[in-house]
Amino acid sequence: MGGLSLPHLLLLGVVVLILFGGKGKISEIMGDVAKGIKSFKKGLSDDDAKAPTPPGEPARTIELQAPTSVEPSRDQHKVG
């Protein structure tokens, strides 16, 4: 159980040939998908290269503030 027999391998080969082989529409679509993925990855790496701040401007930071204490309202009553 779980092994690949000759009919399974032939079917897998046919599917691979249909998707990636020949001059069919599906192979062109798969090529376009690959080009899209490559350009997406290139765009992500270009964004990382452009991320530094300008030289005359210091980097901004967010300072942590202590939470303010909230007193319960006089209308609230503890139950229980």
Image: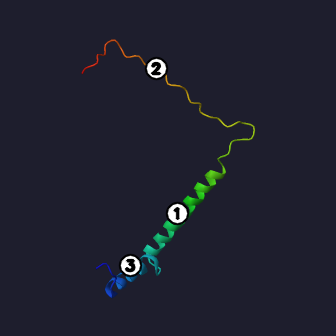
| SS category of the residue bearing label 2 | loop
Splitting the image into 4 quarters, where does residue 75 fall? top left
Residue 55: x, y in percent?
Answer: 74, 41
Q: Are marks 2 and 1 in contact (CB under 8 Å)?
A: no
Label 1 crowd (10 A; few <14 / some 14-19 / many >=20)? few
Splitting the image into 4 quarters, where does residue 19 fall? bottom left
Label 3 crowd (10 A; few <14 / some 14-19 / many >=20)? few
Residue picked out by circle 2: 69
Residue picked out by circle 3: 15
Residue 65: x, y in percent?
Answer: 55, 27
- For the point 38% across and 78% down, which residue is it? 15
Which one is nearer the viewer's eye here, 32 or 70?
Answer: 70
Splitting the image into 4 quarters, where does residue 43 fall? bottom right
C-alpha gap between disc 2 and disc 1: 50 Å
**Which image quadrant: the N terminus?**
bottom left
Residue picked out by circle 1: 37
Residue 14 vertical placement versus 48 (above, below): below
**Which image quadrant: the C terminus?**
top left
What amino acid does circle 1 point to?
Ile
**Left or right, 32 with reference to 10:** right
**Left or right, 5 with reference to 55:** left
Label 2 crowd (10 A; few <14 / some 14-19 / many >=20)? few
Taking the view exactly as shown, the residue that stands out farthest to the left is 80
- For the point 55% across and 59% down, which residue is it? 40
Which one is nearer the viewer's eye here, 9 or 50?
Answer: 9
- For the point 37% across and 80% down, which residue is it? 12
| SS category of the residue bearing label 1 | helix
C-alpha gap between disc 3 and disc 2: 65 Å
What amino acid does circle 3 point to?
Val
Residue 31: x, y in percent?
Answer: 50, 71
